Amino acid sequence: MRRSKPLYFLYLAISFLAISLLLFIVFSRLIAYFKTADQVAGRFYALGQKAVNYRPVFQWDLDLAAGRQMEEQTLEKITDHYLSSYYYHNKLLAYGNKVGLKDHFTDRSRAKVLQAAADMSQEGQKTHSTTISHDLTLDFYSEDGTLVVFKDRVTSYFQLYQEDEFILSDYDTAQYDVMLLLEDNFWRVRHKIRSDILVEPGVKVKSPCIEVRGDQFVYDDKPFTSKGINYYPAKFPWDKFWVNFDLELLKKDFNIIRSAGFNTVRIFIPYEQFGGPDLNPTHLDNLERLLDTAQEYDLKVIVTLFDFFLGYQTENWTLADRHVEGITSRFKTHDAIFAWDVKNEPDLDFDTAGKNEVKEWLSFILKRIKGFDPNHLLTIGWSSPEFITELHEDVDYYSFHFYRDPTELVPYLEIDYDKPLLLEETGQHSYSAWFYPFRKTRKDQAQYLSEITGIIRTHNISYALWTLYDFKNIPDNVVGTLPWRKGIQENFGLIDKRNRRKKAFDLVKEFNLGYE
């Protein structure tokens, strides 16, 4: 049916107007959004929302405060605005970003902050910094509710760069006398005066933990040699483990491990799966069950933290700090813990995250754990023996992984180390698919472990094999999707996919029972 021309043009005109109106509304809202973006960011804390990557710990002491009694809601607002001032100040020093300064500093103090940042920029300098903890003592709250004075014992960290080249870093604790003024509904920093303070080390409690004396491990005043195995259940490797935690299965596996002469298991705590800074209580309870079960079977546990973690940037450190505080402080007196391994193979992140950034983060976390848990040993599980003594001042013993030809291991063990050495991962796969040119048999696996254990015995070091079981399903995020890569990783176990013990199992058991 033919349409009349007037009706047709009317239809086009109405359609054009409707589309134009819709586009106008969309673009108006986009313009409004971008015009107010800075204002929104500048009021991030004022709206009661904390920056997602800034979570310093804080506590208030209100007992000796003079003046008006502090209201709970006001204290919460003061805390949010004060911590916000650090967040935006650190953004200024790192990136020259002035967003948020107007809301959190008075005119005079903001001018000083901006001038100091300008002086640094003029010299080609910048800092990446964060505060970690604040112990706050309220001194005075004015009767009119517009002025507050307090002391802040601050633990902070900064990295100094000159023309984008790292110069130095400092892990710092100081006290500040702080005055805040209430202006336009914002608690703004009026001034801060710094004074240095003496930092006291964490107090070690009396607990039967493994210790280090010279280049030896000691337990209950006797030399201790770790004979260990890296552990995941056969059906639930990597990120499947904690979401399928089975206490009865764990007891069965720990019984096998102990009967094979092992005295140590190494486990992994995935950062995101455990909740990051907001720890998952179910996973924490299951970790406690695992440690309790290990103690029942007379096994020590190396707990490897921050698995699948990549948040090395300074601005994210408070999130890692909340995570590690929650775990290590809870288990600081648990007898089953051998050590905290702060990160599995962090040297593999050097190229993507930057060697300096990774090392600075590791040093920071090691120091923080020692404060939360002064009782247990600390180490780093380097993927390569070339990094054995990196950060040697921060660790209690040296850990490394080795999967090369056994003869290449010997030179690293002939070095005179000042601390105990633990070969934390070693082993050989038995993957023999017809299309894979570098396939290995179970006989090859047994031969490799025979040579490795012989070297271990000769040099009298502690060790941990990879791993107890062959796995049927390796998650894609571990080694990718290529079948031969998955195949290799699935076949490192001493027990195969049909739950049959390989020749390597008996070989290692015999070694363990005769190795002291």
Image (tube, rainbow, N blue to C red):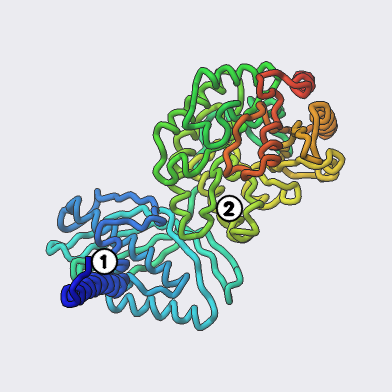
Q: Position of residue 382 (x, y in %)?
A: 68, 46
User: Which quadrant of the figure has residue 451?
Assistant: top right
Q: CA distance from mark 1 to mark 2?
A: 34 Å
Q: Position of residue 271 (x, y in %)?
A: 50, 43
Query: Observer-nearest residue: 469 or 374?
Result: 469
Name the residue at 54% across, 44% down. 306
Q: Position of residue 391 (x, y in %)?
A: 65, 52
Q: Mark number for residue 363? A: 2
User: Which quadrant of the figure has residue 353?
Assistant: bottom right
Q: Residue furthest right?
A: 407
Q: Position of residue 288 (x, y in %)?
A: 47, 28
Q: Amino acid at mark 2?
A: Ser
Depth check, mark 1 against mark 2: the one in front is 2
Q: Amino acid at mark 1?
A: Leu
Name the residue at 33% across, 72% down. 101
Relative to 179, residue 290 above or below: above
Q: Mark number for residue 311? A: none
- Whether residue 489 is visible to the viewer of this picture, yes or no, is yes
Q: Give whichever of discs 1 and 2 has the lower sequence position.
A: 1
Quarter of the picture holding the N terminus = bottom left
Disc 1 target residue: 180
Query: Observer-nearest residue: 249 or 90?
Result: 249
Query: Observer-nearest residue: 179 or 398?
Result: 398
- Whether residue 457 is visible to the viewer of this picture, yes or no, is no
* Tag 2 secondary structure: helix
